[in-house]
Amino acid sequence: MIIEVEQLMAEQDLFGDVPAPAARPRESRKARPPAFPPQHTWFFALRPAVADAARLDAFAEKLMTSHGVTGKRVGAERLHITLELVGHDSDERVVEAACRAADAVRFPSIDARFDAAVTFSAPSGPFVLLAGEGLNGVRELRTALGCAMAEQGFTPQRSYEPHMTLGYDPRHRVERISLDPIGFQIAEFVLVKSHIGLSRHEVLRVWPLNG
């Protein structure tokens, strides 16, 4: 479930006007695999509004059934497009720096239009929606955010394939298929704290796209 954590927003050093620290955090910003399985992951994402999420969820159910994808589906409340990873089990200074980067982004609202689906090669068998030109706005927003994060000492990932994961099925993989375009309007991006293994996302902060 999604939990809006308003009580966390009372922490001014994390969610208010944040002064730059005297020194940048020492923690690596490259999101290297941790020595032990992480408990939490922080990332920036685009999420559909409630009505759009319900529509995409119904579409996902039909699409997965029609192509024999029978694994675990992603709940409507967790459907999203990842923009950029902040880190695993990151300390407060790293999250604060990520928030400062997001504060610097100025970008207009955009559309996301998917026109294809495929199973990615990861062992878990993620079945995803993706697109070419229909996600160019997402790519441009991600570039703007990545540049702002680089100014705060992060090292953004070099490769990026915007997509929305619908479910996981490691036993049945689907080659890329074309779809009639489906998507949603994007008016904001968010910082998410994912509780790994609990199917739970917390939305920590929201940035409107009105640049």
Image: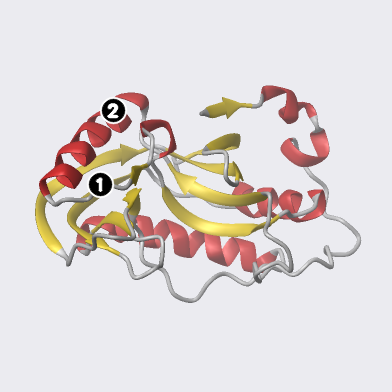
Task: Give the residue pinned by disc 1.
Answer: 70
Q: Earlier in the sequence, mark 2 or mark 1?
A: 2
Residue 13 at x, y percent in the picture = 82, 40
Residue at the image position 57 percent from the left and 39 percent from the top: 198
Q: Calculate the distance from the C-alpha at mark 2 to the C-alpha at mark 1.
A: 19 Å
Outermost residue toward the front in this view: 171
| Above or below: residue 31 compared with residue 180 | below
Task: Give the residue pinned by disc 2.
Answer: 54
Q: Tell me the SS state at disc 2.
A: helix
Residue at the image position 73 percent from the left and 23 percent from the top: 7
**In the image, what residue type sits under mark 2?**
Ala
Sort mark 1 into few (<14), some (14-19) or many (20+) by Cα contacts within 10 Å: some
Residue 104 at x, y percent in the picture = 61, 52
Tally of numbered tags: 2
Outermost residue toward the bottom in this view: 158
Closer to viewer: mark 2 or mark 1? 1
CB contact under 8 Å: marks 2 and 1: no
Residue 5 at x, y percent in the picture = 66, 26
Q: Is residue 127 left or right of residue 178?
A: right
The answer to which quarter of the image holds residue 148 is bottom right
| Above or below: residue 185 compared with residue 105 | above
Residue at the image position 10 percent from the left and 59 percent from the top: 178
Q: Is residue 76 left or right of residue 116?
A: right
| Above or below: residue 127 compared with residue 30 | above
**In the image, what residue type sits under mark 1?**
Thr
Outermost residue toward the right in this view: 22
Sort mark 2 into few (<14), some (14-19) or many (20+) by Cα contacts within 10 Å: some
Look at the image and tell me in which quarter the C terminus lies.
Answer: top left
Residue 162 at x, y percent in the picture = 36, 60
| Foreground of the two, 83 or 102 | 83
